[in-house]
Image (cartoon, rainbow, N blue to C red):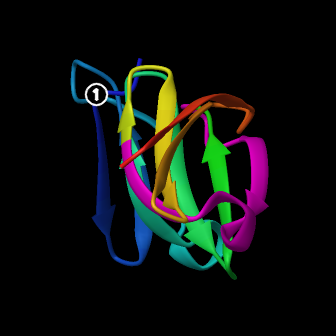
Amino acid sequence: MIADVIYRNKMYYVLNEQGKEISHNWESSLGELMGFSGTFIVFRRNKMYYTMDDRLKEIAHNWESSLGEFRNVAGNSVNFRRNKMIYTYDNRLKEISHRWE
């Protein structure tokens, strides 16, 4: 389970609830950290969003232009804003629902 993601010396470190390192990787490989939950992490790199597991292995990716502006991660879902609508996706970036802002 992901308890924290920290950035140090140009690397991201994924920590469990005991504060032990699960995995790490370079910022240049992962991109910018957008958010995380207990089960997955969202990064943005080269105009794409990537979801990663606790081992920093890619689950899914999609273009920023398709998903919209990142809002937040909550539980097993992630929210994006596009065209005055909020879209909720699962960790594989498959749409679950959408609503007007």
The single residue placed furthest to the left in the displayed view is 18
Q: Residue at x 77, y 43 (%)?
A: 60
Segment colored magenta: 54-72
Residue 25 in view of the camera: no
Residue 58 vs 1, above or below: the answer is below
Quadrant in the picture for residue 29? bottom right
Tell me: 87 left or right of 84. Answer: right
User: In the figure, 12 relative to 8: above or below?
Assistant: above
Quarter of the view holding residue 21? top left
Q: Going by the picture, which residue comes out furthest to the front? A: 100
User: x and y percent of residue 25 in the render?
Assistant: 57, 59
Q: In this picture, is 62 found above or below 28?
A: above
Amino acid tagged 1 = Ala
Left or right, 93 with respect to 17, comes to right
The x, y position of residue 47, in whole percent, is 67, 79
Which residue is at 41% across, 77% downward? 10
Quadrant of the frame with the N terminus: top left
Which quadrant holds residue 68?
Answer: bottom right
User: Is the residue marked by circle 1 packed among few (<14), some (14-19), or many (20+) residues within 10 Å?
Assistant: some
